[in-house]
Every structure is written in structure tokens, then in C-alpha cells.
């Protein structure tokens, strides 16, 4: 295999990222015309148009016209979904690091099209659904500006690559967080908010639980909120325990290998001799304590802001911190908080933010593929003498700088 064949995916993602950046530049250049077009055809048709052009059409070109098969984690999702489609019990009969409902939801399209591509299409449709929910929950001063934001979001390299080519599910978590705000805006009871967050925990990842105790500080009727979580969570937990024993603990038992990009991967070449990164479980616990400590501190500081402002702020804080301090974090996690970063603050008005965000995201789409193809190294100082490892380390530093930049923006933001 030639070097080009080995790194073809990396090159293709670089080409796609550059193309997306150019399209975004042209979109801003012709923003007035685009917004007038949105205004002329209406909100629904505008959203369907940009959703089709930004997600469905690329899917048809890549997976139907060219016939490429879905790659990355989608293959794992597909295999789990095949077991779920046969009504096997998650954790007991097949492995999963995701919440119990996830495999059964991803199994639904397999009854019509039993291929990993069907799971990718589901991920795209869910992302578009979450995007629609977000623009309804966090509209701009006018609808055409909100739709233009949605267009730019669809052109951002990280969501595009991680969703269309990677089939990543991380945006599901933000979907449930946003749904909580949407329900709060419509003056739903704290019981309903508890049920929504409970469903989020059962459907996405164990990470989602980090939001729940922080929301508990913000809701008025804490007992109803806890009851909502219990109503949806305890029956499922009891069901899994009766049929599968303690197998439901699988998502938190499975050990994480060191990944990149995070603080530990960036610092490891400089402190390898000290052996700080050898105890993965200890570092995971340290990371969790740091995340919760800072998140609780920010929650206390945010006592005077409502849930609509609080949720996106604490969401970005949690998951940028996770990318900084968790040794198992990698660049794909950018997908988790890109949508609230674009829609829930006024950063979009600033040219510097937009330029840097596109640059950081472009590098974030390349780094994981390059890292995997050079052997998923957790770099030591002597590795940096090799040109491929040195390039990968530079990519890590750029992406890590982006995460620090986004976190600093949110921490400094007075809402």
C-alpha cells in the first residue's frame, strides 16, 4: 500500500474541509441575497433545502452513487443494532458502551435496509431534527438570520465530517439538553424536565448524567425533577438487573485507552519519564473530579440566569473540559457542543470567532484519521523526531488550542 492509499481518507477530509470553508466564505459574501431567498420561500422550505443540500445530498453521493460503505464507529453501531433488531438484551447478550435504548433505536432502520449506511442516514436525520429544535429554541433577531446560522453550521467541517462520513451520535446528547430548555420555555413542570433528562441518559451516553445534578440546582421543584428521572430510569434499571444482573454497568466498566486530543496527550511527550499517564483509571477519576468541580462552581456563579441561558453555557463548559482533562477524550467530541456554540451565544457576530472556529474545526477533522493511521500513538518525546509523529503532534496542539479558545469565550461571557 502506497502512502497516498494509506492516507487517502486524510487527504479527502482535508479537501472537503477546505471546500466547506470556501463555501462558507461565499455564503457570507452573498449573505443578503441568501437571506432574501430564505425570506421569499419561507422557514420550512428554507430549512428543508439547506438540510437536503448540506446532509442528504452528500449522503446520496457518497453512499449511493459512489457506493462507499460507512466506516468508523458506525460499523460498531450497526453490529449492536443487528443484535437489538433480534430483541437480544443489551449488555447481557451483546456489548455496548452506550445507553440501553441506543442500540434499539439504531435498529429501527435495519428492518428496511440492513447496512451500516442505514445507521449513518439515521444519524444525519437525527442531527437535522436536533438542528430544527435548536433554531426553534434559540432563534436570532429574525428568522432569516437563524436560517443563515443553520446554513453556516451545516458548512462547519467537524459536524459535516463527523456526521456524514463518521456517523457519530454525539449530537443526540445536545438534542435532549435542548429539548429540556424547549420544554422549560413552554412552562412544562419540573417533572417533565426530569423525564426528558432521564430519557437523555437512557438513550445517549453515560456522559449525559453530568448535566442532571447541575440542572437540579436550577429547577424550582427539585423533588418533581428527581421523580421524573426515577419514573423513567428505575423501571429500566430494574428490568436490566432482573434479566442481566449487573451487566448494565458495562458502559462504565469498559476501560478507556489513551486517546488524543486532550491535556494528557499534549503533555505526555514532555512528562513521559514521570509516569503520570500510566494509571488510566486514576486519571479518569481526576478528570471527572475536575469537570464536576468547575461545573458546580460555574453553576453557583450562574444562580441569577435562567435555564435557557444556563444549559448551553454549562454544556460547553462540561464538554470542553472533558476534552481537556479526560485521557480518553478525542477530537470527535467537538461535535457535542458545536451547535450550542453557534446558536446560543452572540459569538456568531464576530469575524475572529468564525475564522478561528472554521480553522480549528478543519484541523479537528483531519487529526483523528491521521492519528489512527500512524498507529494511535500516545506520544513520547523521542517520537517527535519522526516526521509523521511530529505532524500529528502539531495537529493535536492546534485542536487543543481551539478547545481552550472556545472554553475561554464561554467562561468570560456574561449572560
Image (cartoon, helix red, strand yellow):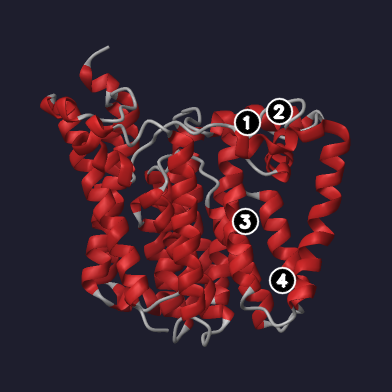
Q: Which residue bears the numbered disc 2? A: 82
Q: Quadrant of the C terminus?
A: bottom left
The residue located at (23%, 14%) in the rendering is 2
Give the distance between the C-alpha atoms of the residues marked 1 and 2, in whole angstroms.
6 Å
Q: Which residue bears the numbered disc 3? A: 209
Q: Within 10 angstroms of label 4, few (less than 14), some, or many (20 or more) residues?
A: many
Q: Which residue bears the numbered disc 4? A: 193
Question: Mark 4: which secondary structure?
Answer: helix
Give the distance between the C-alpha atoms of the residues marked 3 and 1, in whole angstroms.
25 Å
Residue at the outermost front position: 274
Q: Within 10 angstroms of label 3, few (less than 14), some, or many (20 or more) residues?
A: some
Q: In the picture shown, does residue 111 fall above or below 301?
A: above
Q: Are marks 3 and 1 in contact (CB under 8 Å)?
A: no
Question: Mark 2: which secondary structure?
Answer: helix
Question: Disc number at residue 116?
Answer: none
Sequence-first tag of 3 and 4: 4
Give the distance between the C-alpha atoms of the residues marked 2 and 3, in whole angstroms.
27 Å
Question: Mark 1: which secondary structure?
Answer: helix
The residue located at (79%, 74%) in the rendering is 224
Question: Mark 3: which secondary structure?
Answer: helix
Q: Is residue 205 visible?
A: no
Q: Are marks 1 and 2 in contact (CB under 8 Å)?
A: yes
Question: Disc number at residue 78?
Answer: 1
Q: x, y percentage for residue 227?
A: 81, 67
The residue located at (84%, 61%) in the rendering is 231
Side of 246 where 353 appears, left or right: left
Amino acid at each position: 500500500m502506497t502512502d497516498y492509499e494509506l492516507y487517502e481518507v486524510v487527504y479527502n477530509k482535508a479537501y472537503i474541509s477546505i471546500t466547506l470553508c470556501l463555501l462558507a466564505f461565499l455564503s457570507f459574501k452573498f449573505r443578503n441575497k441568501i437571506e432574501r431567498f430564505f425570506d421569499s420561500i419561507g422557514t420550512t422550505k428554507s430549512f428543508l433545502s439547506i438540510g437536503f443540500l448540506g446532509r442528504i445530498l452528500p449522503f446520496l453521493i457518497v453512499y449511493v452513487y459512489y457506493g462507499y460503505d460507512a466506516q468508523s464507529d458506525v460499523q460498531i453501531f450497526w453490529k449492536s443494532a443487528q443484535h437489538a433488531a433480534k430483541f437480544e438484551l443489551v449488555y447481557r447478550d451483546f456489548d455496548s458502551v452506550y445507553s440501553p435504548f441506543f442500540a434499539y433505536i439504531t435498529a429501527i432502520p435495519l428492518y428496511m435496509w440492513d447496512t451500516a449506511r442505514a445507521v449513518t442516514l439515521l444519524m444525519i436525520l437525527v442531527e437535522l431534527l436536533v438542528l430544527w429544535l435548536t433554531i426553534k429554541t434559540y432563534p436570532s433577531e429574525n428568522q432569516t438570520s437563524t436560517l443563515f446560522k443553520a446554513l453556516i453550521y451545516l458548512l462547519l467541517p467537524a459536524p459535516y465530517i463527523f456526521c456524514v462520513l463518521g456517523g457519530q451520535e454525539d449530537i443526540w446528547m445536545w438534542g435532549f439538553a435542548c429539548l429540556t430548555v424547549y420544554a422549560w420555555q413552554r412552562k412544562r413542570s419540573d417533572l417533565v424536565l426530569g423525564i426528558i433528562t432521564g430519557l437523555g441518559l437512557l438513550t445517549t451516553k453515560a456522559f449525559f448524567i453530568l448535566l442532571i445534578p447541575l440542572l437540579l440546582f436550577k429547577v424550582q421543584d427539585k423533588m418533581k425533577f428527581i421523580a421524573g428521572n426515577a419514573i423513567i430510569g428505575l423501571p429500566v434499571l430494574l428490568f436490566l438487573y432482573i434479566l442481566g444482573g449487573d451487566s448494565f454497568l458495562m458502559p462504565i466498566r469498559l476501560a478507556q485507552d489513551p486517546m488524543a486530543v486532550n491535556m494528557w496527550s499534549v503533555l505526555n511527550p514532555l512528562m513521559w519519564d514521570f509516569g503520570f499517564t500510566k494509571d488510566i483509571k486514576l486519571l479518569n477519576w481526576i478528570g471527572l473530579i475536575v469537570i464536576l468541580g468547575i461545573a458546580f462552581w460555574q453553576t453557583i456563579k450562574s444562580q441569577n440566569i435562567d435555564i435557557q441561558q444556563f444549559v448551553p453555557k454549562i454544556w460547553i463548559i462540561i464538554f470542553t473540559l472533558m476534552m481537556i482533562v479526560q485521557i480518553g477524550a478525542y477530537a470527535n467530541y467537538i461535535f457535542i457542543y458545536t451547535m450550542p456554540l453557534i446558536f446560543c451565544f452572540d459569538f456568531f457576530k464576530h469575524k475572529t470567532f468564525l475564522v478561528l472556529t472554521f480553522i480549528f474545526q478543519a484541523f479537528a477533522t483531519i487529526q483523528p484519521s491521521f492519528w489512527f493511521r500512524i498507529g494511535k500513538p500516545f506520544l513520547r518525546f523521542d517520537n517527535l523526531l519522526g516526521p509523521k509523529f511530529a505532524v500529528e503532534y502539531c495537529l493535536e496542539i492546534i485542536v487543543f488550542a481551539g478547545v481552550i479558545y472556545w472554553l475561554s469565550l464561554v467562561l468570560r461571557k456574561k449572560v
